[in-house]
């Protein structure tokens, strides 16, 4: 039975770019959105990949995200700035805010950028990778006002978003170390992927109203909608995602709300309807300005090798450092293509046809997609 397709990254990128051009984005923005979403699929984070397209289009239709925006600097000094993303696409606003942080940190040695009201910033590791490529250490705390998904430790009601954290350390001559995760046990997009027939979730991913635990995304999204192509809405269910790491992850998520939501001016989660916005507090550090003894790079490399030398817990296992799984998955998917559940694929083709996107690109994508179980 057909359950999905596998498609090469270039054809998928072209299809998503054509969709966003047809939806009203200019060519550069459409390409940025497509590249970021497909990069998330390449790195194995399907939750932040092309599965997002229907929801982004719905937000565009509803005026909840705006094409062609630039960050506005609200206030700044040599080593910090508060910037407003005005609900522009995160794939447009994110790189502008990160570039400002890079420029300031290069001049001052360190910089803090408080970004408010950005559209969905996608995979936050992208921004740590951009800073690392410029030779900078960076830390990114992200909240999501307008998104109430996660129960605090000890509670069953949603009070936080999935509030990701990313930290990047550049390693000259080697690949950067990139830690990037949601502070919920599973990222919401992973629940969406599971709802669409993708990977199975851990048995304690959700907490139900009665306090019991579940792995069923219907607890969170509600019963499957008869219109199979409609994007699932978290408003449909009564359960909540659980924070990772019990009280510690829950506490981290609450502090991210305070720093990325309250301090940036983007706003914290709930209650009541609020416009969707990512707030992001980012810290950039130029390692050479801290490295008075000139030993930083050698010490990073020595320590990473020491970590990886730990004996595996399972026979044939291996200790990996942050970022390694993503690099390996990207290499494999570049070689063999990106697997997509059938529903995700049909949603893309349907959106492309509905928007009257470039027919040649749609035909090429259909040609490139090979049926396979996903
Ligand atoms: P995850 O649980 O897959 O964790 C990923 C991190 O763990 C990476 O740093 C990875 O290198 C590391 N890792 C994975 N397996 C490892 C292993 N075996 N050994 C050592 N390290 C390992 O990530 P997630 O929580 O599902 O997050 C997925 C994505 O969702 C992230 O990119 C995050 O930025 C994004 N996100 C975005 C938003 C938003 O509002 N924009 C919200 C939530 C999450």
Image: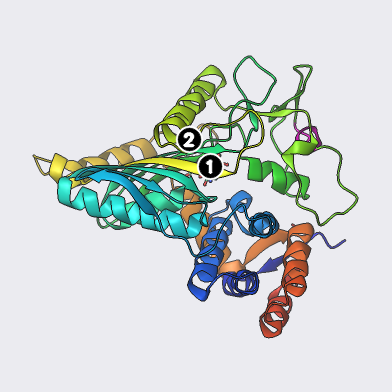
In the rendering, at what x and y percent does residue 209 appear? Answer: 77, 20
Within-10-Å neighbours for mark 2: few <14, some 14–19, many 20+ = few
Left or right of 92? Residue 138 is left
- Residue 274 located left or right of residue 351: left
Q: What colouring does the structure picture have?
A: rainbow
Q: Which residue is mark 2?
A: 312
Q: Looking at the image, can residue 171 be seen? A: no
Q: State the image quarter where residue 223 is shown.
A: top right
Look at the numbered discs 2 and 1 and tell me whether their residues touch, using CB distance below 8 Å: yes
In front: 63, or 146? 63
Q: Which mark is residue 316?
A: 1
* Residue 30 seen anywhere in this rendered image of the structure: yes
Classify the position of the N terminus by image quarter: bottom right
Secondary structure state at the residue bearing disc 1? loop
**Magenta span includes 297:** no
Residue sitting at the far left: 293
Q: Position of residue 259 (x, y in %)?
A: 41, 31
| View extreme (bottom): residue | 360
Is residue 124 shown above or below 209?
Answer: below
Residue range (magenta): 215-221
> Looking at the image, which residue is at 52% across and 65% down?
35
Q: Position of residue 37 (x, y in %)?
A: 56, 59
Q: Residues within 10 Å of mark 1 (few under 14, many from 20)?
A: few
Asked which quadrant contains residue 75, the reply is top left
Residue 205 is marked as: none
Percent position of residue 109, x then y: 17, 45
* Along the viewing direction, whichever of 116 and 110 lies nearer the viewer: 116
């Amino acid at each position: 039975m057909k359950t999905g397709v596998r498609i090469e990254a270039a054809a998928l990128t072209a299809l998503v770019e054509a969709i966003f051009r047809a939806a009203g984005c200019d060519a550069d923005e459409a390409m940025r959105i497509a590249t970021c979403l497909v990069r998330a699929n390449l790195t194995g984070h399907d939750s932040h990949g092309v599965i997002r397209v229907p929801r982004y289009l719905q937000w565009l239709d509803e005026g909840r995200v705006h094409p062609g925006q630039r960050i506005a600097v609200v206030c700044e000094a040599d080593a910090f700035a508060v910037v407003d993303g005005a609900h522009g696409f995160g794939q447009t606003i994110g790189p502008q805010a990160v570039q400002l942080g890079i420029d300031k940190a290069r001049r001052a040695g360190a910089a803090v950028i408080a970004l408010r009201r950005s559209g969905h910033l996608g995979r936050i590791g992208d921004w740590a990778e951009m800073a690392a490529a410029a030779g900078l250490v960076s830390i990114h705390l992200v909240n999501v006002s307008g998104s109430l998904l996660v129960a605090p430790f000890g509670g069953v009601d949603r009070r936080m978003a999935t509030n990701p954290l990313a930290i990047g350390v550049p390693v000259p001559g080697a690949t950067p170390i990139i830690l990037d995760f949601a502070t919920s046990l599973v990222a919401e997009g992973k629940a969406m992927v599971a709802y669409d027939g993708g990977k199975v979730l851990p048995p304690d991913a959700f907490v139900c109203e009665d306090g019991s635990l579940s792995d069923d995304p219907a607890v969170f999204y509600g019963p499957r909608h008869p219109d199979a192509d409609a994007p699932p809405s978290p408003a449909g269910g009564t359960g909540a995602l659980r924070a990772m790491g019990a009280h510690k992850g829950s506490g981290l998520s609450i502090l991210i709300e305070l720093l990325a939501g309250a301090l940036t001016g983007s706003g914290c989660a709930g209650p009541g309807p609020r416009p969707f916005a990512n707030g992001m507090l980012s810290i950039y550090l130029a390692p050479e300005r801290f490295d008075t003894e000139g030993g930083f790079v050698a010490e990073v490399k020595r320590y990473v090798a020491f970590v990886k030398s730990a004996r595996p817990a399972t026979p044939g296992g291996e200790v990996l450092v942050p970022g390694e799984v993503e690099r390996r998955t990207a290499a494999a998917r570049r070689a063999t293509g990106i697997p997509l559940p059938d529903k995700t694929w049909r949603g893309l083709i349907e959106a492309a046809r509905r928007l009257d996107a470039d027919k040649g690109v749609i035909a090429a994508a259909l040609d490139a997609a090979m049926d396979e179980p996903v």
